[in-house]
Image: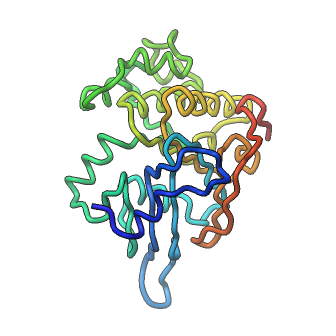
Amino acid sequence: MQNQNAEKAETQPEETGRPAKTTLSARSLSKVYGSGALAIRALDNVDFDLYEGELVVLLGASGSGKSTLLNIIGGLDRPTSGKVFFDGTEITAFDDSALTRYRRDHVGFVFQFYNLVPSLTAEENVALVTEIAADPMSPADALRLVGLGGRLTHFPAQLSGGEQQRVAIARAIAKRPRVLLCDEPTGALDSQTGVIVLEAVERINRELGTTTALITHNVGIAAMADRVIRLADGAIQDVSVNTDKIAASEIRW
């Protein structure tokens, strides 16, 4: 059931020019680690919306609160206070089992480090997800979508860093998640390889309509987003709309 705040989030600012449907929203979200004089406020009363089918870049320096926000909306962590809604349902009220189902059924994760199983091929690494998903695409189709149709039987040690990251993306999207959350997916890559990875993220957002949030400290990457949300000291400092966003292939840093 939606509460009043979630209902308000259903209307997206008109200047974005995109359909006004909210997939994820957070209200008055705070996260505090420790207590007393040693307390660290990683998030400070954040309101956040993620709209259906958009690609958002969360931009900020290390320690700005980007990863904490992503982990909470993805159901990997719980806030100290505040609420998160997915399709109007409050996921912050879920118990651990319900959060696990939310992550399994609706959210794909891509991290800076690939977390592939070394003893499994690219196709087998993706199959780890498709075997437990309700309506998955085939591992081979997922790998073809990220440009790795010719690497199905290769092991991680036989793949470049960019190829391993694209296997990780294929694994994340093979279950057809509503939301794809990427935490510094190019952080361990050189710029040329990073652009190839960003092109894969862009293609998934465009062709599958997957709502995508991408964390980076790299200002150049922000140019490919529909919206750019800048964080500092645990708070959102600015939200801007890219009226003339560029293709990932044009990004340089």
Q: Residue furthest top?
A: 150
Question: Is 92 on the left-hand or right-hand side of 35?
Answer: left
Look at the image and tell me whether residue 42 can be seen.
no
Is 149 in front, or is 99? 99
Q: In which quarter of the view is residue 33 placed? A: bottom left
Q: How is the image coloured?
A: rainbow
Q: Where the C terminus falls, by quadrant?
A: top right
Q: Residue furthest bottom?
A: 37
Coordinates of residue 230 in the picture (x, y in percent): 66, 61
Q: Where the N terminus falls, by quadrant?
A: bottom left
Residue that appears at 50% across and 33% down: 209
Q: In which quarter of the view is residue 187 placed? A: top right
Residue that appears at 27% across and 54% down: 99
Q: In which quarter of the view is residue 133 placed? A: top left
Question: Is 35 on the left-hand or right-hand side of 2?
Answer: right
Question: Is 235 on the left-hand or right-hand side of 82?
Answer: right
Coordinates of residue 148 in the picture (x, y in percent): 53, 16
